[in-house]
Image: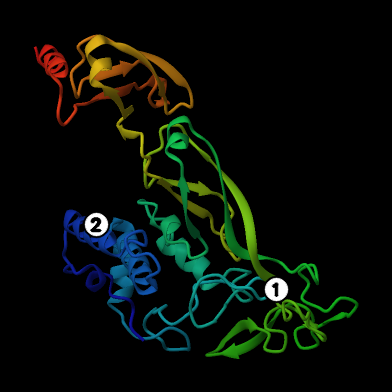
Amino acid sequence: MNTKDYYKILGVGENAAKNEIKSAYRSLAKKYHPDANPGNTSAEEKFKEVSEAYDVLSDDAKRSRYDQMRKYGGSFGGRGSQGFDFSGFDFGTYSRQGKRSGRGFGVDLSDILGGFGLGDIFSQYFDMGRSSAGSAKAVNENDIHVTVTIPFELSITGGKAAFSVKKEKACPACGGGGAKPGSTVRTCDKCHGRGFINVVQGGFGVSRPCPECYGKGSIIENPCDTCRGSGAVMGDRKYSVNVPAGITDGKKIRLKGEGKKGAGRGDMIVTVQIKNDRFFSRKGKNVYCTVPLSLKQAAEGTSVKVRTALGRKIQLTVPPLTRHGRMLRLKGMGVQSAGSKGDQLVRIHVNIPENPTEQEKELIEKIKE
C-alpha cells in the first residue's frame, strides 16, 4: 500500500510554492464542491480528498512531517515495516455499541490506543478535518439538503416558513427498540453486550464489530413487523425555519443537529427559493410594481390604492399629466433589514386606445408635452 500522494491529488509539483498550492486547491474545490454537484458521491469524495491534501500541504509543519513519512514508502503494521501508510484503514472509530463514523475497511485500534481510533491519532498529527476554509462542515455526509420555496412577500418581511421532510423516525410499533411488542431482547453472548470483539491482526490487538449482533450488543429474537428490527421507519417530519427579512434567492439556512443520525450528527441545510410574483419584483432593497391607468386618469390625475410587499395597501396620489412609464415612490415600503429601509417604486402604465378619438388625441399630446 502507498501513502496518498497529496501533490498528485492537487496536481502540483513537490517543490510547489504556497500560492501555487492554494490556487490549485481553489480551482479543484470549486469544481468538485457538493453544492455544485448535488447527489454526485464521486465528486463529494474527490472534494474531501482535495480538502485533505490542501489541509496538509498548506501548513508548513504538517507538510514537513508528511514529506518525511512519504519518502519512506513501505506498509503499515507488522514488525520491520519501514513506512506509515494509512490508506485502506478505517479512520473512523467504533462506539461501545459498535456504531462507526467515517468510511474505510473496518479496522479499529480503539482498545490498544486507549479508546482512540486511527482517525483520532491521524487527526491529531495532521489536524485532519479542521480545514481553515471550513470545508469539513460543508461535506459532512450526515447533512441533509432541502429546498424550501417561499412567497415573495415573506422574503421581504421575514417570518417562519413551514415544510416537511421525509426522514427516519422511531418506529411507532416498537418505540425504536426493534423488537416485536411483548418480546424480549437478550444480551449478545459473543461480545457480552459490548458490541465489539477483540482480534489479533498483524501483531496488533484490534477491535471489530461483533459479527453475531452486528455491533448492537444485543440480539432481537422476534423483530418488529413494522420496521423489521431496525427500530426506525421513514415518515414525514414537520419543520419550520426562521426566514430573515430581505433574504435573497438561493441563500442557505442551517438547522443544527437536524441531519442524519450517527457519529458526528449532521445538520439540515435549507436552501431558500423565492417564488416569482406576478405583481412584485425586486432589485436590492427596493421593490417594484406596475399600476395600470386609463388615459383620462393619467391626464387628469387620480388616487389609487396600491398593494405593498409589506402586506399593506397605500393610497397613491397620481398627479395630472402623468406620462406612461413614470415611477412614483412609496417611501420605506421596500425591504426592511439591517437598520435601513428600501422603497417601493410604482411604474405607471397608461393604457392608450388603439383608435383614439379627437379628444383622446388631445389628452395624449398634453401628456407628451
Lateral position of residue 32 relative to residue 151, left or right? left
**Total numbered circles:** 2
The percent position of residue 368, horizontal first and vertical second, equals: 10, 16
Instruction: Tell me the CA gap for discs 2 and 1.
Output: 39 Å
Q: Of marks 2 and 1, which one's residue comes earlier in the chain?
A: 2
Q: Horizontally, is 243 left or right of 334 in the view?
A: right
Q: Secondary structure at mark 2?
A: helix
- Which residue lies under the disc numbered 1? 97
Quadrant into which the N terminus falls: bottom left
What crowding class fits label 2: few (fewer than 14 Cα within 10 Å), some (14-19), or many (20 or more)? some
For residue 317, say whether it is visible. no
Residue that badge 2 annotates: 26
Q: Residue at x 25, y 16 (%)?
A: 296
Q: Which of the two residues, 199 or 44, is positioned nearer the viewer here?
A: 44
**Amino acid under disc 1:** Gln
Query: What residue is at 34 percent from the left and 78 percent from the top?
Result: 3
Q: Position of residue 98 (x, y in %)?
A: 66, 76
Instruction: Answer left or right for 318 relative to 200.
Output: left
Q: Give the residue type that dot 2 points to.
A: Arg
**x then y, percent, for residue 315:** 41, 14
Badges 2 and 1: C-beta atoms under 8 Å apart?
no
